[in-house]
């Protein structure tokens, strides 16, 4: 879970994120003291050495294998075609942005965004940011196994004790 290049401080930050994937920057600061947003971003970006832009937690957890789409998301209301094809595309690319989904599917970004907002409302999901919202959706429908992430992290801690 950790890279050799991670510093002890970065490991501490990542440990908090592994235990609570939805932890905010201010909650990280409360737990470990002064910590810049760039330090949190850099700890995650270490997994993507050739990338120089911000990496979201959604992209991070997808990359390290904790986002596992299990097929179409259960939804009892009638799907419109935008929602259906958007979710179908998310099975292939779960960390795609609204713009990437819109470009791939040939819909407007606003249409894709509205379809996703309807899903979030259906599952009564509210979060601080769009990508946390998507992580919450994936957790709710079984695509993001937070318990497995925590178990794996705890096993790592026990193994290294």
Image: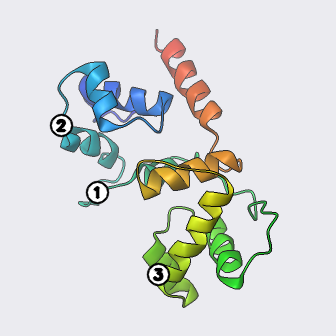
Residue 71, quarter of the rendered image: bottom right
Front residue of 66/75: it is 75
Q: Is residue 60 left or right of residue 149?
A: left
Establish if 142 lies above or below 108: above
Q: Earlier in the sequence, mark 1 or mark 3?
A: 1
**Marks 1 and 3, Cα distance to the nearest angstrom?**
21 Å
Q: Would residue 42 appear left or right of 134 to someone viewing this image?
A: left
* Residue 99 percent across, percent down from the top left: 43, 77
Residue 148 in view here:
yes
Query: What residue is disc 3 on?
Result: 109
Residue at the top extreme, as displayed: 161
Q: Earlier in the sequence, mark 2 or mark 3?
A: 2
Residue 36: which disc?
Answer: 2
127 vs 83: above or below: above
Q: What residue is drawn where x is 72% and y is 81%?
A: 80
Any mark on residue 12, and which?
Answer: none
The residue where tag 1 is placed is 54
Is residue 62 something one can see in this rendering? Answer: no
Q: Residue at x 71, y 47 (%)?
A: 142
């Amino acid at each position: 879970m950790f890279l050799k290049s991670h510093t002890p401080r970065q490991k501490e930050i990542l440990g908090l994120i592994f235990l609570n994937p939805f932890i905010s920057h201010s909650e990280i600061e409360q737990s470990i003291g002064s910590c810049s947003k760039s330090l949190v971003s850099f700890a995650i970006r270490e997994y993507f050495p050739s990338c120089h832009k911000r990496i979201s937690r959604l992209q991070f957890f997808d990359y390290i294998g904790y986002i596992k789409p299990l097929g179409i998301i259960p939804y009892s209301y009638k799907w419109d075609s935008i929602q259906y094809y958007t979710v179908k595309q998310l099975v292939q690319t779960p960390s795609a942005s609204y713009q990437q989904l819109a470009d791939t599917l040939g819909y407007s970004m606003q249409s894709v965004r509205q379809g996703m907002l309807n899903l979030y409302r259906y599952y009564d999901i509210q979060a601080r940011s769009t990508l946390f919202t998507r992580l919450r959706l994936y957790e709710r429908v079984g695509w993001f196994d937070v318990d497995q992430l925590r178990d794996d992290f705890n096993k790592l801690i026990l193994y290294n004790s």
